Structure formats: structure tokens, C-alpha cells
Image (cartoon, grey):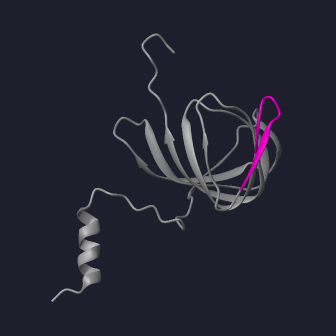
């Protein structure tokens, strides 16, 4: 007879729901483009764990070392900070600091800077709207 744990694992394997473990390693490493870098160590990592078939929705884990860089969002992004502290500043100079445990949304069209104050890790969910036929 199977135990309850075996039955749960078998059910998860068939279930179309994806679990995103917060301890997933962000194994794809990269650096912020030098043209956008303002200061600091631009090393970052990502583990994109899901993308929909249309490639408009993505989610996974991201991490970064302390640095500051310019951002311009074409996508909408929901974030839940797992570790660290980040200061996000818009082009007008208004700033918001987020800490481990905080959740926030960055809307498409946002421009400003990201400053990782302490090594940071986040869960992310990104939606990239399709471009309209007129280019908008």
C-alpha cells in the first residue's frame, strides 16, 4: 500500500500547477549592461521557472549583488522580496525602499533606477503585453 506522501508526489507530477520553491538557485548568471550601470557590482542571476506558450507571462527567482542601474519597463512585474533590501527611484526622484517580506508591482512604462542595497532575492511574475499592430 502506498503512503500519503507517495500519493501526493504522484498527484503533483500530473497536476498542471507549478510549485516555485523559494530556495531555487538562480543559475543563469549575467551582468547589467554597462550603458545602464550607475555603480556597484552588476552580477545578477535568474531561474525562469515558467513561461506561457505565447511568451508573454514568465515567473521565477531573481537575485542580485549590491549595485545601481537604470531601468525602463515594457512589462508589468509583480515581485515578492525573499531576501535583502532594494531602493527603487522613479525619474522624478520619488523613492520606495522594499525589504525581505515585501511585495510590490512595477507597472509597464516605469523608468528610473534600481539600487540593490543588500544582496537581494525575489520571486517574480512578469506580464509582457503584446505589441499592437500599429506599433503601440
Q: Tell me what residue is drawn at x 28 percent, y 56 percent.
A: 16
Q: Residue 47 vs residue 18: left or right?
A: right
The quarter of the picture where residue 55 lies is: top left
In front here: 44 or 50?
Answer: 50
Q: Residue 43 vs residue 7: left or right?
A: right
Quadrant location of the N terminus in the rendered image: bottom left
Q: Is residue 118 magenta?
A: no
- Please provide percent x and percent y for residue 65: 74, 56
The quarter of the picture where residue 14 lies is: bottom left
What are the residue bounds of the magenta stretch? 88-98
Most frequent secondary structure within the magenta stretch: strand
- Please provide percent x and percent y for residue 62: 59, 54
Q: Is residue 52 above or below residue 19?
A: above
Q: Tell me what residue is drawn at x 24 percent, y 72 percent.
A: 10
- Please provide percent x and percent y for residue 132: 44, 17
Q: Tell me what residue is drawn at x 70 percent, y 42 percent.
A: 32
Amino acid at each position: 500500500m502506498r503512503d500519503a506522501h507517495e500519493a501526493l508526489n504522484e498527484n503533483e507530477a500530473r497536476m498542471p500547477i507549478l510549485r516555485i520553491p523559494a530556495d531555487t538557485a538562480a543559475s543563469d548568471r549575467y551582468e547589467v549592461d554597462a550603458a545602464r550601470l550607475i555603480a556597484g557590482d552588476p552580477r545578477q542571476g535568474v531561474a525562469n521557472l515558467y513561461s506561457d506558450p505565447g511568451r508573454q507571462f514568465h515567473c521565477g527567482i531573481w537575485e542580485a549583488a549590491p549595485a545601481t542601474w537604470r531601468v525602463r519597463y515594457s512589462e508589468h512585474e509583480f515581485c515578492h522580496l525573499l531576501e535583502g533590501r532594494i531602493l527603487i527611484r522613479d525619474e522624478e526622484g520619488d523613492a520606495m525602499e522594499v525589504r525581505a517580506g515585501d511585495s510590490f508591482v512595477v507597472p509597464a512604462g516605469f523608468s528610473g533606477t534600481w539600487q540593490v542595497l543588500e544582496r537581494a532575492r525575489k520571486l517574480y511574475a512578469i506580464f509582457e503585453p503584446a505589441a499592437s499592430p500599429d506599433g503601440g
